Image (cartoon, grey):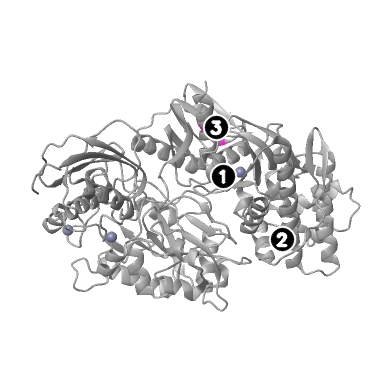
Amino acid sequence: MEASALRVARRLTVNGVVQGVGFRPFVHRLAARLGLAGWVRNVAGTVEIHLEGDAPQMDAFESALRAEAPPIARIDDVHSIVAVADGADGFSIAASADADSARPVPPDVATCPECERELFDPANRRHRHPFITCTACGPRFTIIDSLPYDRERTSMKAFAACARCTAEYAAPEDRRYHAETLACPSCGPRVWFEGADGGGRADGDKAVLLAATALRMGAVLGVRGLGGFHLAVDATNDSAVRRLRSRKHRDAKPLAVMVRTLTQARAVARINDREAAALQSSARPIVLLRPREGAPLAPAIAPGLDRVGLMLAYSPLHHLLLHATDRPLVMTSGNLNEEPIAIGVDEGRARLRSLVDAFLLHDRDIVSRCDDSVVRVAESHDILMRRARGYAPVPIFLPAASPAPLVAVGPHLKNTFSLVRTDRAFVSPHIGDLEGIEALEHWQGAYTRYRRLFRVEPTIAVRDLHPGYLSTRIAEELGLSRVIAVQHHHAHIAAVAAEHGVTDPVVGLAFDGTGFGDDGNVWGAEVLVCDLSGYQRLAQLRYVSLPGGDLAAREPWRVAVGYEALAGWQSDAFSLAYYGIPLAQRSSVQQQVERGINAPLGSSMGRLFDAAAAVLGVRRHSSFEGQAAMELEALAGDQPAAPLPFPTYEAEGRLHLDPVPLLIALGEGRKHGVDVALLAARFHESIVEASVDLARLVAGSYGLGTVALGGGAFQNARLLSRIACRLTEARLRVLVPRELSPNDGAISYGQAAVASWLLSRE
Ligand SMILES: [Zn+2]
Ligand SMILES: [Zn+2]
Ligand SMILES: [Zn+2]
């Protein structure tokens, strides 16, 4: 480039997810195209760009920087200042400048279209290579040990790049320029197949073909993937799916299905444009879709539900396997029940041997465990049901910077934890239920790894209010200088407000299964007025006895007994709830309620759904939390319906919603032969009507204009969409969970938001 009198210089700082996503090579190509000189380098978590040349070209550079950035990059902001030109010649990638600060780690990215093309191109040297990647795709978070992101700090360090790969790495015009994960058949990781007993080993392409044959014959396979093991079976083979269920001790919870292409997905499910976009996004989540009538999927995949969880292949190994089996595959977490998924080869062999007939393994280590994410496309927006692979660990901003690094340990069930440094929360992927030694070890392992990865050394812990949870013990035993407790539903609403950057008071509708209330009861349908510093509980669902405590969450008929007691044992509207329950058992539970023995009081929306399902005769026993609610939602579909009576009364200075007339109306309707699907729809509409009325009342009397919706009950798309829509019509601003799940996966972030706010004001 020739120097001219017009030559100027600019220094750009780019914040966001800009490392490990092919950003510097992209900047290099862009600068070359526009004839700009200078350099680009990673500085801590940001990218710094020095440009020299003509001003109009620099303007073009700045707009193209956002418009043409790699699809997996996330630019939060670009800061541009005038710099001194030093007559730089050409453009280069400069050495990283390390600084001690929090830095984003990129999430894993699904195989890009170009790599997929090469994978199936016989002329390409990476034809059928199960580890093909480039700067735009491949594993990131799950293989990164520490930062900065370079091959020697990932599990790719075990595979020295060959001369041809090294040449590609060093060539600016190559799309694998600075691709830390690049590999090829001669230098990359290996796959192999082995029987459950370790015998019958086959390597390479033969392994994939043997695995496909086994699957086609109905075998259950343990497949080592990106963030852990999957258990795979032929999704069109009902007896194979049943075998998987019985081995995994998973009776009814829906199983995810993987296909290779969108066309194949359309053959099994009805998919609208937004759902197609979610399926094809670089995060490749499981998307909950309506199955097509007559789709060749085994009935045992999602019994009783109107949705099937579908995802597209996201790693080259998946592409090869699905290509060879030529049918949809069930791909469910490689674990028993709710235990953490297995990741290591030996660990997988040991823990999954009894569940599988054979394994498809590889020798690239998984550093961080990461489940598949789950998305539901609702009318109003996409609901992230589980935030893990493809999303974590991208930081989520907090409205207030914390003056001290902290860890929010999260809830008891569906745990995630968050590390906080200044105004960034690094929310862990889904950890699971904190029950048992394995979950505890998994938690501690992830905590140790995250501290190193993000260079956050917490001095303060944040926990739930419940004194007895394992998460509380974890927080207390970390030995930090201070522990802050945050109420569960306050955390739910704080999470939603904080991700939207809202710090003013809002009306919060917190609807979920279980959270420990400040009066010692089980909360779960609360109307709060709150901001990040605190909350007032202005309305609740009327308390009901939950005979058996935790057992009531698995046996909806028990909750119905609690409500029948509130009805004074007078109504025969509850009779369907006890169908098939032995009389002796029923009367002992009735006594439990009357005497208040092991029958905690609860105001839970989840339990109200359970009771309604029991009263309607839909479900009396659940095999997983939320099953009854999912079935009621499936029954209701989107048919319009009028609400049933769901009155409020005032007591203890608060409004109480009384579901007894509602449940009686459901039971009587059923007795008079009203269609159960219509009754399920009327039940939903009753909750919508009552919540909207309450929210408007509270907003009006407190002069508030914003309502936040949080809690696991808002995974119900009908409930969420209808309430959001009605509140919007009433000219209220509605905040819904977008970056995080409505369910307890968001609790650690909510805890972090509250604690950061409090600490920043001390
Ligand atoms: Zn690629
Ligand atoms: Zn190579
Ligand atoms: Zn909750």
Q: Whole-Å distance between the Cαs marked 2 and 1?
A: 24 Å
Q: Residue furthest front?
A: 5
CB under 8 Å between callouts 2 and 3? no
Ligand 3 - quadrant of the structure image: top right
Q: Position of residue 515 (x, y in %)?
A: 64, 40
Amino acid bearing label 1: Asp
Q: In the figure, is residue 89 to the left or right of 419?
A: left
Q: Is the residue marked by circle 1 packed among few (<14), some (14-19), or many (20+) residues within 10 Å?
A: many
Q: Which residues are magenta?
A: 470-474
Task: Judge by depth and name the residue closer to the eye, 656 or 585.
Answer: 656
**For residue 154, which numbered disc appears in the image?**
none
Residue 580 lies, in percent from the top left, at 78, 62
The amino acid at mark 3 is Val
Q: Secondary structure at mark 1?
A: helix
Residue 183 picture location, percent across and down:
21, 57
Q: Which residue is mark 2?
A: 619
The total number of labels drawn is: 3
Q: Which mark is residue 754?
A: 3
Q: Quadrant of residue 196?
A: bottom left
Is disc 1 in contact with disc 3, using a CB cutoff of under 8 Å?
no
Main SS, magenta residues: helix
For the residue pair 300 and 690, the one nearer the viewer reads as: 690
Residue depth check, mark 1 versus mark 3: number of the one nearer the observer: 3
Can you tell which quarter of the image residue 221 is in? bottom left
For the residue labelled by badge 3, is the local secondary structure a helix, a strand or a loop? helix
Is 742 magenta? The answer is no
Crowd class of label 2 (few under 14; some 14 to 19; many from 20; radius 10 Å): many
Q: Is residue 471 magenta?
A: yes
